[in-house]
Image (spheres, helix red, strand yellow):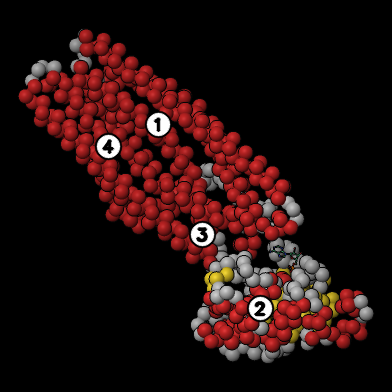
Amino acid sequence: MSSNKKPSKRKRPDDLKGTIARIWRYLSIQKGWLFLVIVMVVFSSGFSLLGPYLTSVAIDNYLVPGKLEGLPLILGLLVAVYVLQSAATFFQNFWMIGIAQKTVYRMRKDLFHHLHRLPIPFFDKKTHGELMSRLTNDIENVSRTLNSSVIQIFSSVLTLIGTVGLMLWLSPLLTLITFTIIPLMFLGMKWITNRTGHYFKEQQRNLGEMNSVIEETLSGQQIIKSFSQEKRVLTQLDEKNEALRASGFWAMTYSGFIPKLMNVLNNVSFLLIAAAGGLLSLKGLVSIGVIVAFIQYSRLFTRPLNDLANQFNTILSAVAGAERVFNILDEKEERPDEGDAVSLQQVKGKVAFRNVSFGYEKDGATLTNLSFEAKAGESVAIIGPTGAGKTTIVNLLMRFYELNGGTIEVDDHDVTKVKRESLRQNMGFVLQDTFLFNGTVRENIRYGRLDATDEEVEEAARVANAHTFISRLSEGYDTVLNQDGGGISYGQRQLLSIARAVLADPAILILDEATSSIDTRTEIQIQKALWSLMEGRTSFIIAHRLNTIQRADQIIALDQGKIIEKGTHEQLLEQKGYLWGQVGT
Ligand code: ADP
């Protein structure tokens, strides 16, 4: 179903300013802590600038003139400066990590809550892999960037300004000489980042594609095995794996050049300062202390430039990740119930479709002008070829999608004027593909009505003919099931879902009859359970078995989204139409 939808992995946000403003809205909840972090960054950058200056003072004022008695004081000062710098750095990181984690915690929370309020069509359009990737990778990316990059950028800018200022103040001439390497640095960095950017993008894209394949492989294991497609899937995975390896290799290799380049340039600038400084000091234009300070400052100066260039891409990709998260948050929620929406009281179960038209796509016509009525307590079998629109009728009844035209009424109330929760509470589902949660048999049945007592759960299981097989399980009602229903058969899963519906006791039932073969004994049990469940309820059955169709009060035959026949079994047989053709009489 989802194979043709690939996760999009943009590295650059579409709306940089808007997205940053939205991240700021999350961050600004912790303004006080942010302020403290900024204070710490100012301190740590300031102290890191003070160190080399104090060294130059120590050399020029104490070492060179031989005033050794003053030296301990200035050395003590130096030690204090470095200790304070470490402390400030520690707190800036510690507090920023706290802020970052709280921020992404809030984002995740908003995202979870929002996902639960999104309408079904949204989930039709997105792959699980893509949603998972937003919930995990994208948010993780934002978290990592907030943890370190934000501080780093701020402290890099401060250090850069401070260093340049101090260098100019100490010796404008030496500063100019040091700056000659800047163009070299920019050229080198540009060459590298162009390539790393390309390969990092590739790497992200390949990672997304591989995750998509892995996700499908895991959830489709049975299909893959039953069609003996292991080889094809493995080849596909191998290809993605290889692509990921290649892009990862080049991304890492090129980004590994950055520190090497910086090292070379640092050495070049060391050489320049030493040579030019030496010459200038011979002429008495600069002191030895200033040269030593310059060598340290030139390092302080290249590092932030390097960091800024590095962080730029990281930040862009995190902002793009945040934008993807915000895009989901901006998805329209299920339209809220109208202000005057009513709650259904004591539903009898009369259901009417009046000229209902609907398409999954805006201009599509999955159902056209459908009208039928089910009296309270009636059973309606819906038949027709695959793709005729049987499941769609059921989806519309649950209000998973909005109609293009016509109305659906329950007990003469237009369902758009009924609170969704109240509508869904009065409807029960028994689907072919029973969804089981990780939990015990008891918990799985209780999902039908959370406040049911253990006795009620067992009673429901008896009505559903499930009690006997449950009692034979190793732990009875306490046997733990997993999502795939491991340990129990397909038919038994259906019995559990019938028990769930019995417990929920809805006025309207929706049944999707199993098409796959189940052993005759379980089949009879299921049939019996279903008919006793349907007693006194309005039921819609997507029917595949003749037996079911014969017993239904009403049959609706669909083809290509239109009703082609409607009536009782006898009536339809007399018409000698679709049903007559199907049963082959
Ligand atoms: P049936 O249950 O009779 O086999 P469905 O009601 O599932 O048929 O489908 C009716 C038509 O609507 C089919 O052509 C199907 O491809 C299309 N369809 C079903 N579900 C979706 C969906 N979520 N998005 C788009 N088209 C869909």
**Displayed quadrant of residue 473:** bottom right
Residue type for callout 1:
Asn
| Structural distance between the alpha carbons of marks 1 and 4 | 16 Å
The mark closer to the camera, 2 or 3, is: 2
Task: Give the crowd class for mark 2: few <14, some 14-19, many >=20 residues within 10 Å.
Answer: many
Q: Earlier in the sequence, mark 1 or mark 3?
A: 1
| Structural distance between the alpha carbons of marks 4 and 2 | 68 Å
Counting from the top left corner in percent of width and height, residue 233 is at 69, 48
Where 440 falls versus 453 (above or below)?
above
Q: To which residue does mark 4 refer? A: 45
Residues at marks 4 and 2 touching, judged by CB atoms closer than 8 Å:
no
Q: To which residue does mark 2 refer? A: 495
Counting from the top left corner in percent of width and height, residue 550 is at 82, 84
Q: Earlier in the sequence, mark 1 or mark 2?
A: 1
Task: Give the crowd class for mark 3: few <14, some 14-19, many >=20 residues within 10 Å.
Answer: some
Secondary structure of the residue carrying numbered label 3: helix
Q: Which mark is residue 36?
A: none
Residues at marks 1 and 4 touching, judged by CB atoms closer than 8 Å:
no
